[in-house]
Amino acid sequence: MQTTISIRLLPSEAGDTTAILGYIARLTGYKKSAVSGFHILKSSIDARGRQAYINLTLLAFINEPFHQRTPQRIAFKDVTHAATTIIIVGAGPAGLFAALRLCESGIKPLILERGKDVKARRRDLAALNKKGIVHPDSNYCFGEGGAGTYSDGKLYTRSNKRGDINRILNLFVQFGADEKILYEAHPHIGTNKLPQIITAMREQILQCGGIFLFEKKVSGFIVDDNQMKGVTTADGHTFTGNAVILATGHSARDIFQLLVNRKIQVEAKPFALGVRIEHPQALIDTIQYHTQQRGAYLPPASYSLVQQVDDRGVFSFCMCPGGIIAPAATSAGEIVVNGWSPSKRNNPFANSGMVVAVSDKDLQGLEEYPDKKQLTGPLSMMHFQQWVEQRSHTAGGGGQVAPAQRLCDFTADRVSASLPACSYIPGLNSVALKDVLPGFVAESLKQALREFGKKMKGYDTNEAVLVATESRTSSPVRIPRDPETLQHPDVKNLYPCGEGAGYAGGIISAAMDGEKIADLLAVKYS
């Protein structure tokens, strides 16, 4: 028979198959020899007490042969001669999963990506890290796989209303991800493994007969009688199709401006802005696991923090255990930071975004902003975001050197005499971050960090450094769409999609949004 059981183990036991088989035998009342094997259905860590435990949900095989898990595999069709072609602008998670779903449905995707493939993209990232040179179309945000390729690969979402999470995880496994992501509570692939997975997805799309073009920056829309017919690219080419899925990501400011110029409706959207905070990983381990030595059986510890400050949310974002802070600017003259972790999460630092919610009311009366007219209209949040990034660049002093301050120095309003070791390769410049961040952001951060120090004893330490600016948490613009047809309300056959359109907040939710639109198009053109 097969039976589902839940067990609570010490970390040293959770990796010991013999120990697990023994637990199964004791809990089910059968001899150990009767248990032929098990599958892990769910795994999570409980570190609330003095001793950390691993909670496992298992499918146990008793008195019958053990069957290896057979991952679900999706079959894709040959779309070489398909009657319907859908243009997809952007090869991030939303665009890639939309394209795969179209291939599955017999529809031909034509993907236009402004950046380069993952292999060529690495050279531009090296120049960004080592020389501070920002390639506007090939960086941590733009290129094959989008921001997701080189930003950690966390596969966690709180919402299963958007689509089938397990289907997305199974597709990642089909293209090379470890099967552990199917049962871990907080699945993670790792920046070192994502490029090969993204490449495998592209090769599948090409094998099906889809079209995948790099360095094709969309510069215009072809609209006739309020219907989207196609796009033009900066190199002078024109592409037409039955519909256009706009999946450009949260940093495609030129696309937002292009929509406004064409009088295609967009809206300002609240987002969050702040800093990246980095601690020694050993310190976070000690706080979270209540021990001086994490040991070999527990992963590097993570955390999640949230605090209301005068009715304003301050929260950790994209926490990266054993991670690295990376420069994520998309234009020269701005500083943007993000974080990522390799699959083993074995770097000596832990970093996280620590951000403050920003709404349109915060832009009113912002005295230090140079052009008050920009603080109204559909691109007001985008202009505000860019302004803070440019202030950060000025404070950094040049290249991609970022302004920074020790945590306790920041809360005490004193400039740090020195800065601790940090994973951020381009380098840091010690400044007073209250002179870089908008006043309401700096003050909210100060109050929240003091409270976080009470929640996590030892968190508020001068061993920690704040690096500005973490500003690409989500899109500052929303492109509206009809809730039923998913089309733009003013332009038929234009389908805003994913993070850039304001309908997703991470790899999984963006992938599900791409599939959602592809499913609708499959019905429409069946």
Image (cartoon, rainbow, N blue to C red):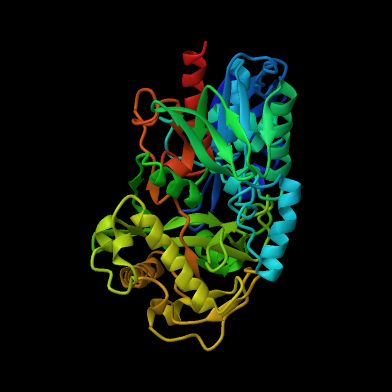
Camera-side residue: 400 or 441? 400
Location of residue 346 in the rendering, given as x and y in whole percent from the top left corner: 68, 59
Camera-side residue: 65 or 288? 288
Q: Is residue 31 visible?
A: yes
**In the depicted structure, whether residue 483 falls above or below residue 249:** above
Location of residue 236 in the rendering, given as x and y in whole percent from the top left corner: 63, 41
Location of residue 443 in the rendering, given as x and y in whole percent from the top left corner: 32, 72
Within the image, what quadrant is residue 35 found in?
top right
**In the depicted structure, whether residue 146 falls above or below residue 246:** below
Camera-side residue: 7 or 516? 516
Residue lying furthest top: 526
Camera-side residue: 112 or 429? 112
Residue lying furthest bottom: 417
Location of residue 204 in the rendering, given as x and y in whole percent from the top left corner: 72, 27
- Residue drawn at (66%, 27%), measured in percent from left and top? 38
- Residue drawn at (36%, 53%), measured in percent from left and top? 379
**In the depicted structure, whether residue 70 falls above or below residue 320:** above
Judged left or right of residue 364, residue 161 is right
- Residue drawn at (32%, 73%), measured in percent from left and top? 439
Within the image, what quadrant is residue 295 found in?
bottom right
Q: Quadrant of the N terminus?
A: top right
Q: Is residue 21 visible?
A: no
